[in-house]
Amino acid sequence: MRVCGGVSRAVLAALVLVLNTGCWVYNFHGGGLPADVKSMAILPFDNQTPNPELQQQLLDEMRKTLESRLGVHEASEDQADAIVSGAIVRYDIDIPIGYSATTGNQPVTGTRRKLELVVDVQIVDQKTGKTLFKRQGMVADGEYAERAETDGRGQALKKLVSDMVEGAQSQW
């Protein structure tokens, strides 16, 4: 029997099943952390780089992303179920990336730069003392046009925090 412009009910049912399964697979509410971890304290990372802005920018990105993607709420260190801590160990900027092309008979060179951000991070369950996630030397990079380092930094911070979330989720 045909419904919906020639699509059979079996195909429609299979599509609904796949979509429902997909929604279930990608529903990270609770984030893959143990069920009793409902709150998290995100401590400012020790900044071992010469860029003083990095610490606050990383903290802001983590607060924005960890809560929504891991399904936890932020709490003070003494009240939180888990603690996120770490260090910003390296920030390399101005790594040249050269692009060139030919437009007509004229060679065109566009200069772009790349930066790398490296952190050590760990998430510890305060009740049990168990390390829920730990990664040394997490690297994220970002590309930017000349004199637009903040754009590349924003990309790197987003990638880094996303990798933290995925790492924490994959532990469970």
Image: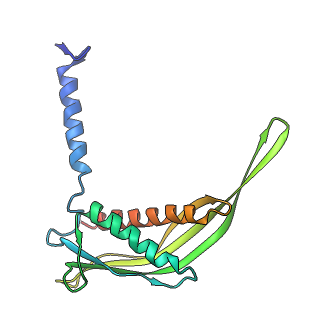
**Residue at x-position 66% and y-position 67%:** 95
Q: Nearer the viewer, residue 7 or 87?
A: 87
Give the image location of residue 141, x and y in percent.
54, 64
Q: Nearer the viewer, residue 22 or 143?
A: 143
Q: Is residue 125 above or below residue 93?
A: below
Name the image quarter holding residue 171: bottom left
**Residue at x-position 24% and y-position 62%:** 31
Q: How many marks?
A: 0
Q: Is residue 74 above or below residue 30?
A: below
Side of 151 where 69 appears, left or right: left
**Residue at x-position 25% and y-position 84%:** 77
Q: Quadrant of the C terminus?
A: bottom left
Give the image location of residue 49, x and y in percent.
55, 82
Name the image quarter holding residue 10: top left
**In the image as oriented, which residue stretches furthest toward the right?**
105
Name the image quarter holding residue 104: top right
Side of 155 where 36 appears, left or right: left
**Residue at x-position 22% and y-position 85%:** 129
Side of 13 where 159 appears, left or right: right
Q: Quadrant of the N terminus?
A: top left
Q: Is residue 115 above or below residue 82?
A: above
Give the image location of residue 50, x and y in percent.
58, 83
Q: Is residue 121 above or below residue 105?
A: below
Give the image location of residue 157, x and y in percent.
47, 66
